[in-house]
Amino acid sequence: AEGSSFRGVKEEFLSGVPFPVADGVFGDDGAMYVVTGGRRGVSGLYRISSPEPSQQITLAKLEDNKPEEAQRALRKSLSDTYTQPEIANVDLLWEHLNHPDRFIRYTAFTGLEHHPLEWWKARYLKETDPDKLISASIALAHIGTQKEANMAFTKLGLLSFKNLSEGQKLAFLRALELVCIRLDSPGPLQKVLFRDKLSKAFPTTHDQLNQELAKLLVFLEKKGVQEDILDLMDQKAS
């Protein structure tokens, strides 16, 4: 368990050449049964069990999950607002737009998308917290119309890109992309603003950031950016 969600680690515990798995099931004894065959291979039945008693594994998992129970309960309460839109929900959703757990942040701004924009538009215009503003901008891009594009560009343009963390920068770029794709393109002055803001940050040492920055700078028609991108690709290949 990790926060309101879970993280898994891939671990190879059985392999073969060839090993054409046809089906698998967990039995009442806690073991995993796998059938192989087909593709002109030899058919086989495998029983895979753990050296530890099943009860010990279950108890260990339950013990590990206790600290995250509150966060999962919070995430559930936020998702419950999807089917019960009430103006009182906006306070709860807005409060968690900057939650450190990204799954809770996602659930919060998705909840906003299930509530009329009129209920939270004034709050959006007053917001200055970067995380809340970015999350709300993603929600706005999903449910807004062309007439809200200028509002979104104005609010995002007020953020200092260089002062954001890497995670915040990626979220910012995603929000800006969504507004451009779903609502409208920025006007001439806004295009210059974002082009200058993002040009100063490109390239970075972060590959994913470079990918997102490159796409937006091409869209914003930065002069010579294609050559910069090709040079960066050559550096990565060498």
Image (cartoon, helix red, strand yellow):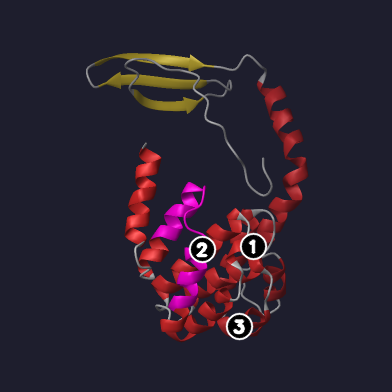
Q: Secondary structure at mark 3?
A: helix
Q: CA distance from mark 2 to mark 1?
A: 12 Å
> Disc 3 marks which residue?
121
Residue farthest along the left direction in this orientation: 40
SS assignment for the magenta stretch, majority: helix
- In the rendered image of this protein, does residue 108 appear above or below residue 21? below
- In the rendered image of this protein, does residue 127 appear above or below residue 16? below
Going by the numbered disc 2, the residue's amino acid type is Lys
Horizontal side of 149 relative to 94 (left or right) equals left
The residue under the point 74% across, 35% down is 64
> Disc 2 marks which residue?
200
Q: Is residue 206 magenta?
A: yes
- In the rendered image of this protein, does residue 56 appear above or below residue 87? above
Q: Secondary structure at mark 2?
A: loop
Expressed as whole percent of the image width and height from the top left, the position of residue 127 reads 67, 77
Residue situated in front as seen by the camera: 34 or 149: 149
Q: Quadrant of the C terminus?
A: top left
Going by the numbered disc 3, the residue's amino acid type is Lys
> Does the CB distance between marks 3 and 2 fall below 8 Å?
no
Horizontal side of 51 relative to 18 (left or right) equals right
Check disc 1: other Cα within 10 Å, few if <14, some if 14-19, many if 20+: few
- What residue span does the magenta drawing correspond to? 191-214
The answer to which of marks 2 and 1 sits earlier in the sequence is: 1
Check disc 3: other Cα within 10 Å, few if <14, some if 14-19, many if 20+: some
Expressed as whole percent of the image width and height from the top left, the position of residue 86 reads 65, 78
Expressed as whole percent of the image width and height from the top left, the position of residue 61 reads 70, 32
